[in-house]
Image (cartoon, helix red, strand yellow):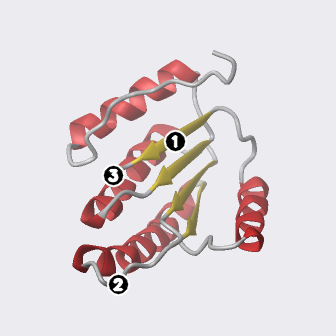
Amino acid sequence: NEIRAHAFACDVLSEHSVKQLIGQSLDALGGADLLINVAGKGYVRALGMMRVSRAFAAAAAGRPVTIANIAAATSNLQQFGYAGSKPAFRRLSDGLGGKLRAGGVTVITADELQDKGAVEAFIARLCQSAQTLSPVVRSASR
């Protein structure tokens, strides 16, 4: 209650579940200007980010909003599923940003937040892009 947090379940592999998540969260918050996608594992990382981002942008209906897509800071090329998913996440996020820019949506992609300086630069860019940082919808894909 102190931070006005809400929790909702969502299966990012289901378009219906994603649309329901966005609808419920925006209703509970009374709208939002910022979506933060925190990546999951393997192909779900990119798929979840794309589905949740598209649904959030559609719900914004032309209002200026910011989407921040954050992938893990570590690189584990020893795992087959991970090796391809991180570059796919970045390319899809960057492509989504290009597609949504004309509709007033700013997409910020971060996948190399390995040190304090990178985190500070990311936060500064996020704050500069967002009109207001509250309320926030956070998406954590697993």
* Residue at the far bottom in the pictured view: 77
Instruction: Give the side of residue 87 with respect to residue 106, left or right.
Output: left
Considering every residue shown, the one lying at the far top of the view is: 1
Q: In this rendering, is residue 84 above or below 38?
A: below
The image position of residue 60, as x and y in percent, is 52, 40
Depth order, front residue of 41/122: 41
**Closer to the camera, 72 or 93?**
72
Residue at position x 59%, y 34% in the image: 32
Q: Position of residue 19 (x, y in %)?
A: 32, 36
Q: Which mark is residue 51?
A: 3
Q: CA distance from mark 2 to mark 1?
A: 27 Å
For residue 90, side relative to residue 48 (left or right): right
The secondary structure type at the circle numbered 2 is: loop
Residue at image position (50%, 27%) is: 26
Relative to 51, does residue 91 appear above or below in the rendering?
below
Mark 3 surroundings within 10 Å by alpha-carbon count, few (fewer than 14), some (14 through 19), many (20 or more)? some
Q: Secondary structure at mark 3?
A: helix
